[in-house]
Image (cartoon, grey):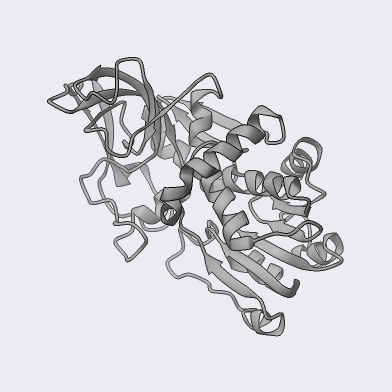
């Protein structure tokens, strides 16, 4: 049977199991031009929380009664589409279900020779693309500059920091807890790490970034964004990728220190990777090369069982995960 989670109601605050409906249906069959994918891994991303809201965004909201949107990777088990054959591994956005039916649009073939399947939902997937274009195109770091990254042990932040090191920058990460901070400095090569749970973040940024911050890559918003803005260098660039501290709040807390942009003659710019779809292959080439040479390290936290989707999703917001969070179907 095909196990499916659909959006049942729009969450107020943190999503609850009751905000989703669980259904079982027959495995779909392919019609002309279609293929059926057995989904092996489902990506869990902070953006999913925003997709549940009925508000203007860069992508339409998930409708009530619709399969919950999610990136997936799996194996073709039936095909009547000449571009795909049985046994191909494909990545795409097929939602929180165990089998997907597709006409092939939006699916891309991937190879397990380069990396495990789940890595195509992390460093070689949306998070890697977000880190690549957000840092290099929006942040435009130069060798010798200081790059500060929030949620630095997460799927996007960990890749941002490593790319910045590859480009010759001094890299400081902000993460929650001593274990995550050790991961940043000892395994990923960050120059310094700030534990926002146990340190005065504003003072810690000033200490770790004595020459101030040239590029701030923001994944959390809220107070940490304000602390970063207070430590900007002249002509700094602030990349707005996400605001995970705000996604479950009824009202968004905007930056209070925005006048730092004026004082530092800095700029703050948002990032959506869909704007770069024509350049994805460029990013995949670099990310794949760095992964193959060991310059880029990746970590996926794999949780078991599609039935556990609602509870596993909450780990994104509690900090109970390291690296990229995926659900093994």
Dividing the image into 4 quarters, which one contains the N terminus? Answer: top left
* Res. 48 visible in picture: yes
Q: Position of residue 249 (x, y in %)?
A: 46, 63
Q: Where is residue 114 in the image (x, y as percent from the top left)?
A: 56, 23
Q: Is residue 37 left or right of residue 300?
A: left
What is the count of numbered marks? 0
Q: In this view, does 138 lie to the left or right of 304?
A: right
Residue placed most toward the observer, 233 or 17:
233
Q: Position of residue 191 (x, y in %)?
A: 82, 49
Residue drawn at x 33%, y 53% is: 52
Q: Position of residue 243 (x, y in %)?
A: 53, 60
Residue drawn at x 55%, y 53% is: 133
Residue drawn at x 72%, y 42% is: 180
Q: Is residue 30 left or right of residue 113?
A: left
* Res. 127 visible in picture: no
* Residue 28 found in image quarter: top left
Residue placed most toward the observer, 20 or 42:
42
Q: In this view, does 156 lie to the left or right of 83?
A: right
Furthest toward the left, the residue is 32
* Residue 128 found in image quarter: top right
Q: Is residue 231 above or below residue 150?
A: below
Q: Is residue 176 above or below residue 217?
A: above
Dividing the image into 4 quarters, which one contains the C terminus? Answer: top left
Residue placed most toward the observer, 102 or 326:
102
């Amino acid at each position: 049977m095909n196990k499916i989670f659909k959006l049942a109601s729009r969450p107020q605050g943190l999503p609850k199991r009751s905000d989703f409906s669980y259904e079982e249906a027959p495995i779909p069959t392919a019609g002309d031009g279609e293929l059926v994918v057995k989904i092996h891994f489902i990506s869990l991303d902070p953006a999913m929380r925003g997709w549940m809201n009925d508000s203007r965004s860069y992508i339409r909201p998930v409708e009530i009664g619709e399969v919950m949107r999610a990136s997936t990777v799996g194996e073709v088990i039936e095909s009547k589409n000449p571009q795909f054959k049985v046994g191909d591994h494909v990545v795409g956005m097929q939602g929180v279900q165990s089998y997907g039916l597709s006409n092939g649009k939006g699916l891309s073939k991937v190879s397990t020779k380069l990396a495990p399947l789940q890595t195509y939902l992390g460093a070689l997937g949306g998070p890697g693309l977000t880190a690549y274009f957000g840092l290099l195109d929006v942040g435009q770091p130069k060798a010798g500059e200081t790059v500060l990254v929030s949620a630095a042990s997460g799927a996007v932040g960990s890749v941002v920091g490593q790319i910045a090191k590859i480009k010759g920058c001094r890299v400081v990460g902000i993460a929650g807890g001593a274990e995550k901070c050790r991961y940043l400095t000892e395994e990923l090569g960050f120059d310094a790490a700030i534990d926002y749970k146990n340190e005065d973040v504003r003072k810690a940024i000033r200490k770790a970034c004595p020459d101030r911050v040239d590029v701030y890559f923001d994944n959390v918003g809220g107070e940490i964004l304000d602390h970063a803005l207070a430590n900007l260098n002249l002509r700094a660039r602030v990349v707005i990728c996400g605001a995970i501290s705000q996604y479950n709040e009824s009202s968004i807390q905007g930056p209070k220190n925005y006048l730092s942009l004026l004082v530092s003659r800095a700029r703050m710019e948002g990032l959506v990777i869909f704007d770069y779809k024509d350049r994805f292959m460029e990013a995949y080439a670099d990310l794949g090369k760095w992964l193959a040479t060991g310059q880029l390290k990746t970590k996926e936290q794999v949780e078991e069982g599609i039935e556990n989707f609602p509870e596993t999703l909450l780990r994104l917001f509690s900090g109970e995960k390291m690296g990229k969070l995926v659900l093994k179907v």
